[in-house]
Image: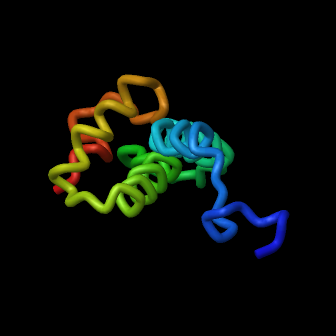
Amino acid sequence: MSKNCPPNGGNSRDWSTYNAAQVNEKSLFLLILSELCREIVEPKYGTGCPPFRLRDMIFCLVYKVYSTFSSRRLQSDLREAQAKGVSYARSRARTPFQIT
């Protein structure tokens, strides 16, 4: 075995950094997703009730795929994201967070 290889076969890991990344993964994901969605240009709409914002819909869809939760189980996480200001949902009788 080479002198430069660690005794465990080359799989040396900075465990404190790895642990910190795992502990903060979800919150960092939400911040990154929020920043990405903020860059989405909203299409213009004509008459009638304004549609849901495209950035809100994309945020919800990507978060659902990331979480692998069912729509019912995801709703509490979406409400949390809204309360933290990570998401932008308008207050309407029905928001994109109320997935039916």
* Closer to the camera in the image, 16 or 65: 16
Can residue 45 be seen? Answer: yes
Left or right of 92: which side holds 12?
A: right
Quadrant of the image containing the N terminus:
bottom right
**Above or below, 79 relative to 70:** above
Colour approach in the figure: rainbow
Q: Residue at x 38, y 30 (%)?
A: 82
* Closer to the camera in the image, 96 or 5: 5
Residue 12 image offset from top left, x and y in percent: 66, 57
Residue 80 image offset from top left, x and y in percent: 32, 30
Residue 81 image offset from top left, x and y in percent: 39, 33
Q: Residue at x 60, y 49 (%)?
A: 42
Residue 71 image offset from top left, x and y in percent: 21, 56
Q: Where on the picture, by quarter, is residue 10? A: bottom right
Q: Residue at x 35, y 55 (%)?
A: 67
**Above or below, 89 relative to 29:** above
Q: Residue at x 51, y 41 (%)?
A: 19
- The number of numbered discs placed on residues in the rendered structure image is 0
Left or right of 11: which side holds 79?
A: left
Quadrant of the image containing the C terminus:
bottom left
Left or right of 14: which side holds 97?
A: left
Q: Residue pushed farthest bottom?
A: 1
Q: Where on the picture, by quarter, is residue 4? A: bottom right
* Closer to the camera in the image, 82 or 52: 82
Can residue 34 be seen? Answer: no
